Image (cartoon, rainbow, N blue to C red):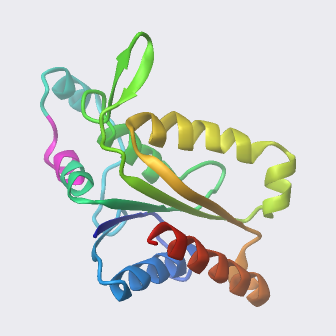
Amino acid sequence: MKHLIIYVNPDEKSFSHEIKEYVKNFSLDQGHEIEVRDLYKVNFNPVLSLKELQMLEKDELPKDVKKEQEYLEWADFITFIYPIWWQIPAMMKGYFDRVFSYGYAYILEDDQPKGLLPKKKVLKYNPMGTPRDIYEKNGLRKAYEKAIDKGIIESTGLKIVDSILFGGNPRDHNSLRKKYLEELESSLNKAFD
């Protein structure tokens, strides 16, 4: 299986980084081909410019966007790993804006988005500082899932098979970190079963 990991976090000491390494090693141990797109390391430009919008109107793509779309086409399975800060990081939002472009990832039919990407399976892992139960109680988890899971990812045709929020900064709490790594392993085993 070809596994694409889209990763966003500049901090190599972050729990996001630990998740990325865990997912990468799990996939390699399963014998999958992997490609990790660390958007900071590849210097991905998240800004959708006027020039690019004008190019899109002419069905032209910048080379960096075309390259990311080729990775999506190559993959059988996609994992997104990025933290939740105030919202999703600007780098991730810019990736969605530029790479999941109109005419490539979706079109509108009868005023509804119609996904153009094949129904590839997606995992989504998001560390955050806010404890998970608070994010649940205040309604932000539902809002986040509606905006990102439904509004972006699934509206392109991709299918989320698991999405985990890792709250409460597990990097500083070993018992929480251990619990979350067990959740991660369980999620990966189910997804790749």
Eyeballing the image, is 23 above or below 148? below
Name the residue nearer the viewer: 12 or 116.
116
Q: Position of residue 162 (x, y in %)?
A: 56, 59
Q: Residue at x 45, y 18 (%)?
A: 112
Task: Give left or right: position of 137 versus 183.
Answer: right
Q: Position of residue 109 (x, y in %)?
A: 37, 15
Q: Main secondary structure of the magenta part?
A: helix
Please provide the residue range marked out in magenta. 61-68
Q: Please, which residue is most extreme toward the front here?
A: 193
Q: Residue at x 20, y 27 (%)?
A: 56
Eyeballing the image, is 66 above or below 128? above
Q: Residue at x 30, y 28 (%)?
A: 102
The question of residue 63 being in magenta is answered with yes
Residue 74 occupies which quadrant of the picture? bottom left
The question of residue 7 being in magenta is answered with no
Q: Position of residue 142 (x, y in %)?
A: 72, 42
Q: Residue at x 25, y 27 (%)?
A: 103
